[in-house]
Amino acid sequence: MRTKLAVAAVVLAVFPWFLHDYGLQVAIQALVLGVFAMSFNLLFRNTGLLSFGHAACFGAAGYTTALLVSKLRWSFAATLPLALVAAALVALVIGFFSVRLTKIYFTMLTLAFSQMLWAVAHKWYGFTGGDNGITGLLPPGLLGNPKGLYYASLVALVLVSGIIYIVRRSPAGYTLRAVRDNPARAEAIGISAFEYMVAAFVLSGTLSGLAGFLHVAWQHSAFPDLLYWTTSAEVIIAVILGGSAEFFGPAIGAVVLVVLEAVVRSHTQYWPLALGMVLLAMVLFFPSGVISLFQRRQREEVPRAAA
Amino acid sequence: MPLLEVRRVSKSFEGFQALSDVSLAVEEGSLYALMGPNGAGKTTLFNVITGRYTLDAGRVLFANQDISHTPTHRIIHYGIGVSFQRAIPFPSMTVLENVALAVLALDRKTRNFAHPLLSYADAAERAEEIISWVGLDDLKRQLTAALPQGDLKRVDIAIALASKPRLLLLDEPLAGLSRAERAQMVGFIRELLRSLGTTLLFTEHDTEAVLQLAGRIMVLHRGSVLAEGTPNEIRSHPQVQEAFLGREA
Ligand SMILES: Nc1ncnc2c1ncn2[C@@H]1O[C@H](COP(=O)(O)OP(=O)(O)OP(=O)(O)O)[C@@H](O)[C@H]1O
Ligand SMILES: [Mg+2]
């Protein structure tokens, strides 16, 4: 594992020097989606909660950055703390009302919240520019240069992965999995399932905000699409493609999805069709993600205890 | 003054009366058994005590404090531990992790996120002690998902003991165990009281085991108290004989 990581780190570090501009754009997109997918999976894997509303956190951060830069002339980098706070607040509200619900109801309510936020961004022309979006946001310095943005995104991915790794093996991480495994048992040893699920939602949403910030830096613009359900769907697809049970599965899924999209789009206009077929094949043949193609070891699914 | 007092508790589910007007008192340092056929309301009574179910009427007192409306996750801090009827601990973790997490939860350290679980040396050490105590040393590094039911019961009790309960609620500790395991568990329950001083309230279908173990017994039937008393009183209670002890009457 260590050598694999070291090799991956070296490859990722020298990679931009071998890419043309278009390739670099694809690489940045993959890294940003990778950050998003890792953050999403922090919630999904550790608590079992399938959020269909992570676009709200991603977009809240993105719009915060875009609005501060366009309206108040803040420098790009200076907006990052507030962008993360916005993502955290949105996550807190959605999490607070949703985590009490189980399974499909949780998923539907998170979707409803994010669609509400999308509707606001879409209709409020005076503030967000509606579907004209906020454009012309050229970040100065490092973030405005493709190679600089690539490295910033890579650092973000390393940072997010590090945070997730550390939290996972801590008492708090075990507590989340205890709540997922057997909420009744967890409560009986003194754990408030509600509190921990909300906390996990907030952490996951905040880190997703980092991806939203990078996305706006990459696109030089913010559109209501950031908050639309397709953004949530994209991150879920990346996680399914890569495999949620593997630590780096979501990041690998993000790379596969983005590269696949770039390749398919350059040949046909039927990307949604191709995506549908890929997903179908995944579900039928590789339910634990593309990463399972590269390893013999079969992971055992942990049975979810009945409450 | 009893350690646990249940006063005239009732609970219904959509019109179905699962408990009606049930009262009991468990003295500190005693073994108290709840008996009754399937569906009598034993587990429901446990759930009412631990706050998993809100009660419709009545009160639950523990060490003279009213805990009737205390949320489940606070119950342990009063000193009430539980082992469930269907013992499924946390299957994605090893035995040691299961127990260590319960130790940390009691100490309110589960919010810590910077260091690995087992690097909390005090907690890990205490967890190891408890695991030895229940005789699971050989299995401590095993994932609980892979363990047979008999071992799971003991893991579940180890988790409950990690919370240092004054009162331990055991829901059918003997169910699903082999003959040898049952004898072992009976000895183990006695030992809990003798060496740890843990007061026990337990449910059990095996009448003989209950009569041997318990200091006092309550028999529930369709949510109501059919009889309450010492094993001898229960043994000679006419309605109980009729209903459960047929072969001995
Ligand atoms: N959450 C619930 N919703 C609806 N009915 C319930 C619920 N919990 C228990 N009941 C009903 O209450 C009655 C008592 O159930 P309970 O589990 O307390 O019985 P028990 O004495 O523990 O039985 P067993 O020996 O089978 O464990 C049963 O008829 C059960 O169906
Ligand atoms: Mg029961």
Image: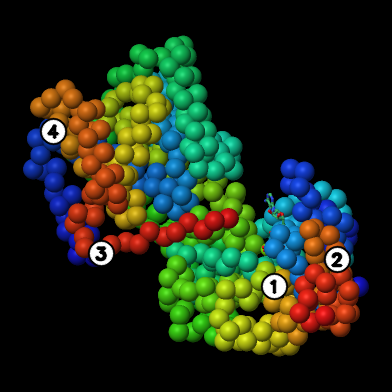
Q: Chain under label 1?
A: B
Label pair 4/1, CB-CB below 8 angstroms: no
* Disc 3 residue type (three-letter): Arg
Q: In this figure, which residue is indicated by the disc labeled 1? A: B205
Q: Chain under label 4?
A: A
Image depth: mark 4 or mark 1 in front: 1
Q: How many marks?
A: 4
**Image point (60%, 49%), residue name:** A194
| Residue B125 appears in view | no
Element on which disc 3 rests: loop
Coordinates of residue A143 in the picture (x, y in percent) = 27, 35
Q: In this figure, which residue is indicated by the disc labeled 3? A: A297
Label 1 near ligand 1 (CB < 8 Å): yes
Label pair 2/1, CB-CB below 8 angstroms: no
Q: Quadrant of ligand 2?
A: bottom right
Q: In this figure, which residue is indicated by the disc labeled 2? A: B226
Labels 3, 1: one chain: no
Image depth: mark 3 or mark 4 in front: 3
* Badge 4 density bin: few <14, some 14–19, many ≥20, Cα 10 Å: few
Q: With respect to residue A191, does A287 lie above or below?
A: above
Coordinates of residue B18 in the picture (x, y in percent) = 77, 54
* Disc 1 residue type (three-letter): His
Dot 2 or dot 1, earlier in sequence: 1
Q: Nearer the viewer, residue B147 or B98?
A: B147
Whole-number angstrom distance, CA of label 3 to CA of label 4: 30 Å
Q: In this figure, which residue is indicated by the disc labeled 4? A: A263
Q: With respect to residue A280, does B206 lie above or below?
A: below
Whole-number angstrom distance, CA of label 4 to CA of label 2: 75 Å
**Image point (71%, 86%), residue name:** B190
Labels 3, 4: one chain: yes
Whole-number angstrom distance, CA of label 2 to CA of label 1: 15 Å
Whole-number angstrom distance, CA of label 3 to CA of label 1: 43 Å
